[in-house]
Amino acid sequence: MLAFFWPGVAHYDSVAQYQQVVSGAYYDWHPPAMARLWTVFYRLGWTGQAPMFALQTLFYWIGLGLVAAALARSGARKAALGVFALGLWPPLLGWQALVVKDGQMAAALLCATGLVAWKRLQGRPLGWSGTAALVLLLGYAALVRSNAIFAVAPLAVGLFAPWRWRDWRRRFVLIGATTLAVLALSPMINHGLFGAEPSDVEATQPLFDIAGIAHRAGPEAVPLLPTTTWRRIEAKRCHSSVLWDIFSIGKRCDFIQRGLAGRPRREIFSAWARAIGEHPGSYLSHRFAHWNATTRWFVPWHFPQAVPQAQSLPNRLALGSPGRQLVVYNRFAGWLANSPAGAPILALGVALAVLALARPAQSAAHGLAVPLALSATAMELSFLFVSIASDWRYHLWSMLAAWLSAILLVTEPLPKRRAWIALAGLALIALSALAARLMLPQIGDDYQALIR
């Protein structure tokens, strides 16, 4: 993978973060934890995106390799081969070649899972050094994406102690408390510890939701901006439930954000809460439309932001690109990502099936499968309320965790009737997704197709 994809692909976010690394001026629109880690390599003289690409590739394969080796050692050789096949699946591999926060998060969590699997599947404790590594990996993963904690908390609770359903109430309380604590502490860590300047990134979620509510409930529903502004929004079709980007500065609907410039954040958040409380139906309609888009259930086959980027964004920072071989490879990877097999909604179905079938008290493999499935489920459900875009890469970890949990699940015999019911449910999701892809009008594969 290092040879084929070297030196990694610099995504738009990668270029923005590397500018911070070079300039030494950090802000919190992108995760400061990743930029600060990148700075360590930069100051050691290893410039460009290659060190971060090497790091996430090593974490990715160390994690998968340890899980596969642990399974093979326990006699589950077919499952071990399945782990490697999962890691080599083109959409996952293609997107993992991008030096971006989603790949960093997925790689760190895979490495953490591998460390625990290597010890737990042979009934041995992790030890102090392993526990320290686990804390570092989970901590980095939690800070490298704004919503990563929804995936990290359930996984962490299951990695630090074998999962048992009999104490599920205590564990869910712990998951909830951990999630709230990290959400509360993250701004202090980003601004205090990492020295990142605030960029008002928090206001993007309220703006995205408010525009969706105003479109459905009428311009008078949200008095945050003048009625004439909301009518202009309708005239210019500024009511996407797919992504926030059309409101950003420089895009065709940036007059909304400009109109809010200088407004106190409290006023924006208050208007957001009031609009949700007064128009819950419009809010839920907007959020479900977005969740459908980001989980790629009822969408056309060619739906933007699924094909992995093959070349780095043009830049003046000497961030290079892999060879031309990646163009053909990523075209095939994108076709698979656009198919029902690449739909995050199918991965969510797999995770739910694992939770219904796993017996963690009777199997160490099932004891690992449950927290992986919980992590994928929590991450996908979080997009119902905390998400402003529908890029395929946001689901990298969820898809890895869900399918890895399924591989761990099938290492033990399953109750046949319940297994057949689960397979029927997955088939229904896949067939309905396929029907949508065949029947709905095509949009296109590129970013510009979404912001026109």
Image (spheres, rainbow, N blue to C red):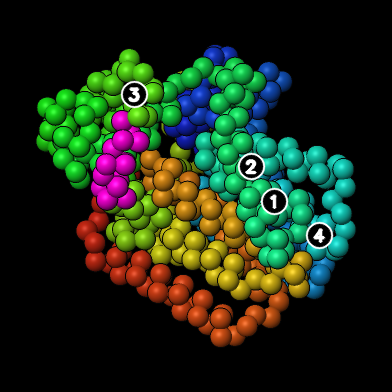
Asked if one can make out residue 28 in the rendered structure from this viewpoint, the answer is yes
Q: Residue placed at 68% from the left, 65% from the top?
A: 165
Q: Residue placed at 47% from the left, 48% from the top?
A: 382
Q: Main secondary structure of the magenta part?
A: helix
N-terminal of the pair, mark 2 or mark 4, is: 4
Residue highlighted by disc 1 = 157
N-terminal of the pair, mark 4 or mark 1, is: 4
Magenta residue span: 271-284
Asked if one can make out residue 444 in the rendered structure from this viewpoint, the answer is no
Q: Position of 148 compared to 391: left or right?
A: right
Q: Residue placed at 59% from the left, 68% from the top?
A: 354
Spatial CA distance of label 4 from label 1 is 14 Å
Q: Amino acid at mark 2?
A: Thr
Spatial CA distance of label 1 from label 3 is 37 Å
Q: Amino acid at mark 3?
A: Glu
Residue 137 pos. (x, y %): 70, 40
Residue highlighted by disc 2 = 178
Spatial CA distance of label 4 from label 3 is 50 Å
Residue 58 pos. (x, y %): 69, 44
The answer to whether the residue labelled 1 contacts the one labelled 2, judged by CB atoms less than 8 Å apart, is yes
Residue highlighted by disc 3 = 267
Spatial CA distance of label 2 from label 3 is 28 Å
Residue highlighted by disc 4 = 120
Q: Between label 4 and label 1, give the one nearer the viewer.
A: 1
Q: Residues within 10 Å of mark 2 (few under 14, many from 20)?
A: some
Q: Residues within 10 Å of mark 1 (few under 14, many from 20)?
A: some
